[in-house]
Image (cartoon, rainbow, N blue to C red):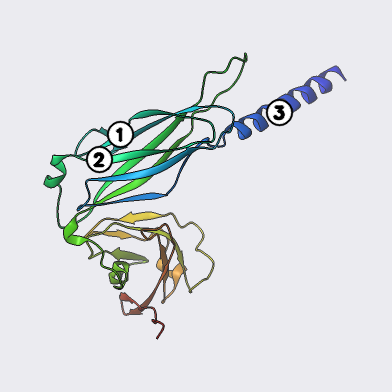
Amino acid sequence: MKRNNTLKTTAIAVALLGAAVAQQAQAAIALDRTRVIFDGDQNSVSLNISNQNKQLPYLAQAWLEDEQGNKMQSPLVVLPPVQRVEPGKPSQVKIQALPAARQLPQDRETLYYFNLREIPPKSDKPNTLQIALQTRIKLFYRPAAIAVQKNTDPAQEQLTLTKQGDKYVVNNPTPYYVTIVDASSKKDGAGVKGFEPFMVPPKGNVPLTVSAASVGSAPVLTYINDYGGRPQLTFSCSGSNCKVVPEKKAS
């Protein structure tokens, strides 16, 4: 009986610890978007952040990384790199372009990552587990020469598929990065099991992470647009080549 009571006590302790971690794992510092588009004709972009904790101030630490995950201070820089955000209050982080930004490729996007880490105040309670949560989102530097024009068809509709063996390869002829987050065999259908999201670079190609058979002869891919929305692309295939079927515009 003593052994059973010990096991029961241990299980309760583990459960309580898990609940405490889950409760503390809710982010205090919130960001107002899931991606950043830095237009080349702008000198800076401001991001809104806020402290969701109504009792405690938090530090917000922000920085940029290149495509390989290396921290960087040029050609874009974050200001301020660290700031205190009062309980329940909003603030801003600015991403500033330096003169070196003019040396970036002007015929396609350049990919970076924006990082935001919250640093909680030091607890005065003993044996307290504190978790510093971090948000990491994509930042696309988009030169003025390829600015997206209003009332034009989405550039993602230019994507094509090429069947190679039992795989479809996604071809991206556009100057933009395209993030594919789901695949299906029909519009609004269930996603294919085993699919893993991926990103196709400008003028590049990447194979689908599932078999061609699983998406059938009229594949449907879901991508993320500039606003975080998830439009679908329906493809029509002829032989080993597939093109997007344009959405019908309302008259």
Please count the marks in the image. Answer: 3
Whether residue 177 sits left or right of residue 128 in the image: it is left
Task: Give the residue type at disc 1.
Answer: Leu
Placement of 42 over or under 65, stated as above or below: below
Contact between labelled residues 1 and 2, with CB atoms less than 8 Å apart: yes
Closer to the camera, 183 or 80?
A: 80
Residue type for callout 3: Leu
Residue 247, image x, y percentages: 39, 78
Residue at the far bottom in the pictured view: 251
Name the mark on residue 79. Answer: 1
CA separation in Å, label 1 and label 3:
40 Å
Query: Residue 230 location in percent, x, y?
Result: 44, 62
Tag 3's secondary structure? helix
Res. 8 image quadrant: top right
Q: Contact (CB < 8 A) between labels 1 and 3?
A: no
- Distance, label 3 to label 2, CA atoms, is 44 Å
Tag of residue 16: 3
* Residue type beneath disc 2: Gln
Say what secondary structure mark 1 lies in.
strand
* Observer able to see residue 164: no
Q: Residue 186 at x, y = what percent?
A: 48, 74
66 shown above or below 142: above
Q: Tell me which residue sits at (34%, 47%) in the image.
A: 138
- Above or below for 118 versus 247: above
- Mark nearer the viewer, 3 or 2: 2
Write down the residue under mark 2.
Answer: 96
Q: Earlier in the sequence, mark 1 or mark 3?
A: 3
Q: Nearer the viewer, residue 57 or 228?
A: 57
Q: Residues within 10 Å of mark 1 (few under 14, many from 20)?
A: some
